[in-house]
Image (cartoon, grey):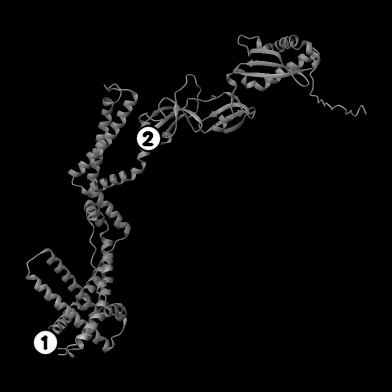
């Protein structure tokens, strides 16, 4: 037996970590190389493995010695450290013997955390159903992965067994078989040689390939598999689903019928409108909750854990998603309870048009009696941020009605043919249609002539009539208007309800009269004609009485010292 000197042994112990790192880094490269190896390199690795065997024996002896000591906390920690050290030495020995990184061959599975286990326990029925639906493709995919893994493992085992065999072929050269370290070395090599037996892996690979081939032959099209899965679902779960839906809607119907006697018109409870609205909303929420809970209880008694889990998961997801909408939901609830800034039976401006809030519930109902199709259903959230006010008695909801004659700020004159919340259509003289957006129409300050209208005409006379302009001339024009427009005055219900002429002001070149005529709304269709008729009458009066109608004159005043061209 040849023992290495103590100095060499200590140097070799220091060289072990570097040698291990070098050998492990070269392992993948060694797996691709040929069988030709440097004998000196193999002997160096053997010497390192002998030292590892010596350390393993020492660790084992320490563990045996600790067994005889009385148990304690510190003794247990020391045993755990020794066991971990022994496992590390075994892995290093195996890596050097096979020239492979054994960590890549035998990876430990990560343990799931507690919350993952709890999540799996909650979703077991759903996972089981999905597993049943996807069983065929998952089995095929598992076999493909198994074949690939076994092929890689077979290659690695062949490389590892070849490297172990090389160490075995070195024989007992320069080794003392009576030494415990040498026996440990040889025994461990023998166990590794049996461990890296490729025959079992080849059998497993052949079986996996046969199973994969058999599965691929009986593989159905995806559409056929999906259709069969749906049929199986409704065949097994359809009755339970039907019973659950029946329980839900039956209970909903009964509670809705009882609503009339609890908080409806036949209720004996006398409460203010806002309190009744609050009770109605609370009752609706209670009914919905009761129906959902009853459906879940029905599934529980039917032992349908799949549908029960799906509904519970859906409700949890719904509650989680709705957390962002809770502030908005709170505002909508306030509106529904008639406690918000917009309230029932008040006036509200929406899109530039006045509306009456008829009711507030799951939806808002707005009314405008002047508009065609003047009933509007809105999501309640549309009224968030809007403000209503009490309705003033006699306040119009729109400036016009269908058939009214109007005059706009752009001097457009016509009859209202249609008016809706989107547009107003005017029929002009000559049957021409003109379209306005409703907000645009309101912005042009429409003058409703069908409610009656007034003419205010400024009529100028020459300054030569200055002595007569205040008294005589106004009476002269008023008699003339009556004489020429007698057909507008002499009626049981005259067209002109008021006629007034008076001196208004002195202009730069004329003395101006103010002619005021109030006309009934039924004459709105002849608005332009009557105006021209009044203007013509005023001119006739001037002609008959030889009254001069002046024209505008330009007067130039020159500074002192300047002469006009005529004077020059």
Circle 2 residue: 332
The disc label shown at residue 239, or none: none
Query: Of 73 and 290, which appears nearest the observer?
Result: 73
When asked about the image quadrant of residue 543, the answer is: top right
- The reply to whether discs 1 and 2 touch (Cβ–Cβ < 8 Å) is no
- Specify few, some or many for label 1: CA neighbours under 10 Å numbering under 14, 14-19, or 20 or more: few
Q: Tell me: 220 left or right of 93.
A: right
Q: Position of residue 78 (x, y in %)?
A: 15, 68
Q: Is residue 224 visible?
A: yes
Q: Which residue is mark 1?
A: 178
Mark 1 against mark 2, which lies toward the viewer? 1
Residue sitting at x 23%, y 39%: 293
Q: Residue drawn 66% across and 19% down?
A: 455
Q: Quadrant of residue 128?
A: bottom left
Query: Nearest the camera: 546 or 175?
Result: 175
Residue 353 x, y percent position in the rendering: 50, 30
Quadrant containing the N terminus is bottom left
Residue drawn 20% across the image and 41% down it: 297
Q: SS class of the residue under badge 2? A: helix
Check the image and report above or below for 33 versus 262: below
Looking at the picture, tell me which residue is in the foreground, 433 or 320. 320
Q: Is residue 477 above or below residue 116?
A: above
Residue 374: percent from left, percent from top? 47, 29
Q: Can you see residue 167?
A: no
Residue 533: percent from the left, percent from the top? 70, 18
In screen coordinates, is 434 left or right of 214? right
Q: CA distance from mark 1 to mark 2?
A: 92 Å
Give the residue at x 16% y 80%.
Answer: 54
Q: Is disc 1 placed on a helix, strand or loop?
A: loop
Q: Earlier in the sequence, mark 1 or mark 2?
A: 1
| Quadrant placement of the C terminus | top right
């Amino acid at each position: 037996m040849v023992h290495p000197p103590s100095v060499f042994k200590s140097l070799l112990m220091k060289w072990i970590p570097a040698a291990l790192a070098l050998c492990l880094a070269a392992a993948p490269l060694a797996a691709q190389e040929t069988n030709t190896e440097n004998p000196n390199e193999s002997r160096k690795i053997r010497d390192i493995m002998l030292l590892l065997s010596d350390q393993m024996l020492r660790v084992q002896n320490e563990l045996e010695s600790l067994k005889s000591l009385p148990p304690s906390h510190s003794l247990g920690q020391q045993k755990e450290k020794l066991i971990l050290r022994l496992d590390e030495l075994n892995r290093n020995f195996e890596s050097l013997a096979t020239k492979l990184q054994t960590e890549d061959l035998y990876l430990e599975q990560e343990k799931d955390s507690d919350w993952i286990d709890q999540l799996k326990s909650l979703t077991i029925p759903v996972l089981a159903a999905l597993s049943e639906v996807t069983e065929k493709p998952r089995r095929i995919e598992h076999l493909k992965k198994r074949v690939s893994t076994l092929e890689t493992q077979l290659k690695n085992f062949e490389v590892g067994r070849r490297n172990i065999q090389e160490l075995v072929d070195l024989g007992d050269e320069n080794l003392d078989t009576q030494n415990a370290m040498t026996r440990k070395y040889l025994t461990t090599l023998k166990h590794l040689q049996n461990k890296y037996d490729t025959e079992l892996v080849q059998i497993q690979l052949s079986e996996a390939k046969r199973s994969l081939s058999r599965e691929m032959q009986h593989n159905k099209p995806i559409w056929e598999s999906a259709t069969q899965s749906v049929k199986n679902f409704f065949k097994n779960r359809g009755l339970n689903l039907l019973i659950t839906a029946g329980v839900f809607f039956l209970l909903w119907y009964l509670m809705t019928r009882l609503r009339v006697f609890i908080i409806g018109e036949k209720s004996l409870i006398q409460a203010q409108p806002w309190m009744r609205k609050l009770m109605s909303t609370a009752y609706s929420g209670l009914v919905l909750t009761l129906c959902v809970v009853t459906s879940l209880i029905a599934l529980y008694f039917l032992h349908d854990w799949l549908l029960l889990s799906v509904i519970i998961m859906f409700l949890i997801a719904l509650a989680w998603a709705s957390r962002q909408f809770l502030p908005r939901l709170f505002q909508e609830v306030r509106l529904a309870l008639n406690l918000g800034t917009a309230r029932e039976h008040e006036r509200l401006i929406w899109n530039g048009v006045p509306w009456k809030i008829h009711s507030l519930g799951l939806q808002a109902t707005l009314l405008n009696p002047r508009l065609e199709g003047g009933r509007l259903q809105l999501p309640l959230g549309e009224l968030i941020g809007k403000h209503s006010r009490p309705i003033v008695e006699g306040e119009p909801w729109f400036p016009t009605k269908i058939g009214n004659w109007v005059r706009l700020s752009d001097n457009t004159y016509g009859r209202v043919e249609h008016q809706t919340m989107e547009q107003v259509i005017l029929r002009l003289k000559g049957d021409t249609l003109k379209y306005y957006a409703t907000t645009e129409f309101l912005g042009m300050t429409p003058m409703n002539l069908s409610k009656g209208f007034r003419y205010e005409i400024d009529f100028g006379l020459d300054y030569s009539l200055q002595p007569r302009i205040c008294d005589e001339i106004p009476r002269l024009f008023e008699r003339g208007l009556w004489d020429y427009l007698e057909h507008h005055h002499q009626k049981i219900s005259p067209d002109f309800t008021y006629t007034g002429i008076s001196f208004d002001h002195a202009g730069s070149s004329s003395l101006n009269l103010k002619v005021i005529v109030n006309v009934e709304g039924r004459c709105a269709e002849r608005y332009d004609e009557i105006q021209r008729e009044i203007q013509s009458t005023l001119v006739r009066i001037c002609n008959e009485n030889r009254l001069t109608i002046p024209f505008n004159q330009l007067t130039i005043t020159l500074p002192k010292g300047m002469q006009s061209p005529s004077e020059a």
